[in-house]
Image (cartoon, rainbow, N blue to C red):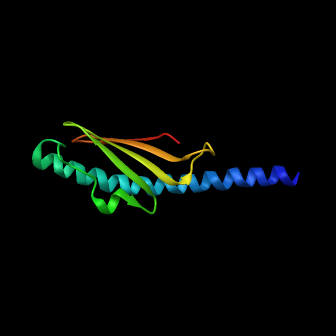
Amino acid sequence: MIVLLFIVFFVKSNSTAAEKNRKEITVVLNNIAANAQTHYKRTNSFNKWVIPSSLRNNEVGTFREKVENEKVTIYVVGKDLGANGVSNVNIKAIITGKNTEINIRN
């Protein structure tokens, strides 16, 4: 019975930490998207845009970008264990000149 309670508590606390990490990442992603879209509006392209160094590695995760002419894809690995209990929170965002789509992968 004690082992079962520990497992339930462990899964519940991991889920809560993952949810918190996802929310924190979303805030940073919104800042990154605003920065990228500002670049796009100035140049009519995402070419030569990079994630600002102050946002690339921080307390919520590691962010990297794949830049194409008409869109930027951001890959994020969070600092907390994700919902699957095996790997860290993992989020992908696609930024265009007009919108941002955020996909939670773990």
Q: Most extreme residue toward the left, as rendered? A: 43
Q: Position of residue 101 (x, y in %)?
A: 36, 40
Q: Position of residue 69 (x, y in %)?
A: 19, 37
Q: Is residue 44 left or right of residue 3?
A: left
Residue 67 falls in image quadrant:
top left
Q: Position of residue 27 (x, y in %)?
A: 39, 56
Q: Residue at x 20, y 36 (%)?
A: 70
The number of callouts visible is 0
Q: Is residue 6 left or right of residue 72?
A: right
Residue 70, above or below 75: above
Q: Is residue 54 left or right of residue 6?
A: left
Q: Residue at x 47, y 54 (%)?
A: 23
Q: Residue at x 26, y 53 (%)?
A: 34
Q: Position of residue 83 (x, y in %)?
A: 60, 45
Q: Is residue 7 left or right of residue 47?
A: right
Q: Residue at x 61, y 42 (%)?
A: 84
Residue 87 falls in image quadrant:
top right
